[in-house]
Image (tube, helix red, strand yellow):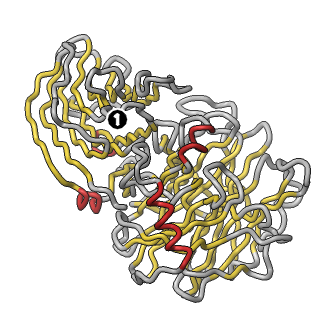
Amino acid sequence: MSTERQASEVDFTAMRARLRGDWHRPQYHFTAPANWMNDPNGLIQWHGVYHMFYQYNPDGPLHGNIHWGHAASTDLVNWEDWPVALAPTPNSPDSHGCYSGCAVDHNGIPTFIYSGNKRLSETDPTIREQRTCIATSADGLRTWTKDPGNPVIPNVPPGMALVQYRDPSAWREGDTWYQITGAGFPDVGGTVLLYRSDDLRHWEYLHPLYVGDVRRTEPFWTGIMWECPQFFALDGTHILIISTWDHGPKQTAYFAGDYAGLRFTPHREGLLDLGWSFFAPQSFRDDTGRRVMFGWLREERERDALVAAGWAGAMSLPRILTAGSDGTLMQAPAPELQSLRGAHVHLEDVAMTDAPGDVLDGLRGGNMEIIAEFAADDAERFGLSVFRALDGSEETRIIYDRARQELLVDRTRSRADTVPERPVVSGACPLGADGRLRLHIFLDGSIVEVFTNDNTACLTARVYPTRPDSTGVALVAEGGRAVAQSLDLWELASVW
């Protein structure tokens, strides 16, 4: 990969340098050089190099004026900022934003398929249309040319009333391209609309690939519209990933099932992440055949705090997707992350009671990896306290509740100055067949990202400690005794 830097890339370096002292800013999760970022877009490996595009506002740390930012990596861990790939074009289908989409290899030509956002009212920004556009690159993904025929899908299907319509995702079967676009039927539920094409420029609408039920609330609510959908084959099953849209809390779900005759029949479903921060993920197949996924980690703090910080949003760690024999979607942190490991501590058979005290005194850090295995004994709840102040006044608890069979992140005391809107985030997490709990935890500035029980569940949350000494780790047991049978902690290096 070339290390030549154009003027815009030098500016990115300076932007990163100005934010280096912010202890809430992640050091090994990818972030934009500064300002606002959200959805991962156009993830692709091209000639051996991983490319990440993402929704980006170059003007500030709030959503608006959406471009496609661009970074490249040879290892999924260390990233190099490249020039912005897409910018809105005045008086065009994307005049008010280049919204989410994908990247494909079309007969050797790297091609974006994305949502052009065009405002239809000068006084009401909510009156707009989003239509499918394409762009291509002739210089190794560095610069992009928008197709003069945009939008390539100029209208929604005839006679169809939709809540929203955006975020195309395409794949190839033989010589035919297929695409799903996120949408929703009023009073019915979210959906993805299926299209096909021979050339990416002329699309035939077929039918909804799958439709949700807005009335359903268990085991999770599937929303009134589905954003950022993806559909792909994985280990003998087909997976549909959707992000639920409404003006309230949002989560990301998957459906696993059979795909035949252009029809999808799901047999299993679940949440990709039990928290509220992980959203709008995108995945791709790399040169080794792995299915690699990144998701947007939303901020969970006030608007004024974003403006003061000068940045917003991060990417999840790269997650490797596999499907279990029953269709369960499993996620594991990419093994390349192990290259960041530094100082290491290993402990075994540490007794845990509800007596106060920092059992792991001296093990501190805001950028850590922890692998822990617990046996519950008779404890009602047990786990870890992280981002813990020396006097215990600030802490975030990663706890397992045996009675509820739930994993939770308790942020009630994560910061001394306020309690977040949803202080406790939790979800179903049965223990392993041997009755043990295994946690693989990544702490990074303001990120808690947890993989559980052989990667069958994940929980991600954002925390913003106010004290510089809130970097400790302690073991926690409530209502009885538990044992940390194995505990490994590593300091992790910054990639910047």
Q: Position of residue 346 (x, y in %)?
A: 10, 41
Q: Which residue is mark 1?
A: 468
Q: Give residue 99's position: percent from left, percent from top.
A: 68, 61
* Picture layout, residue 295 above or below residue 336: above
Is 362 situated left or right of 38 in this image? Answer: left
Question: Is 343 displayed left or right of 178 in the figure?
Answer: left
- The C terminus - image quarter: bottom left
User: In the image, residue 94 lies at what x, y percent?
Assistant: 77, 67
Q: In the picture, which quadrant includes the N terminus?
A: bottom left
Q: So how many labels did they put on this image?
A: 1
Residue drawn at point x = 46 percent, y = 29 percent: 425
Q: Position of residue 355 (x, y in %)?
A: 19, 13
Task: Give, as a three-letter code, the residue at label 1.
Answer: Pro
Residue at 10% from the left image edge and 27% from the top image edge: 350
Q: Residue at x 24, y 32 (%)?
A: 473
Classify 133 as above or below 62: below
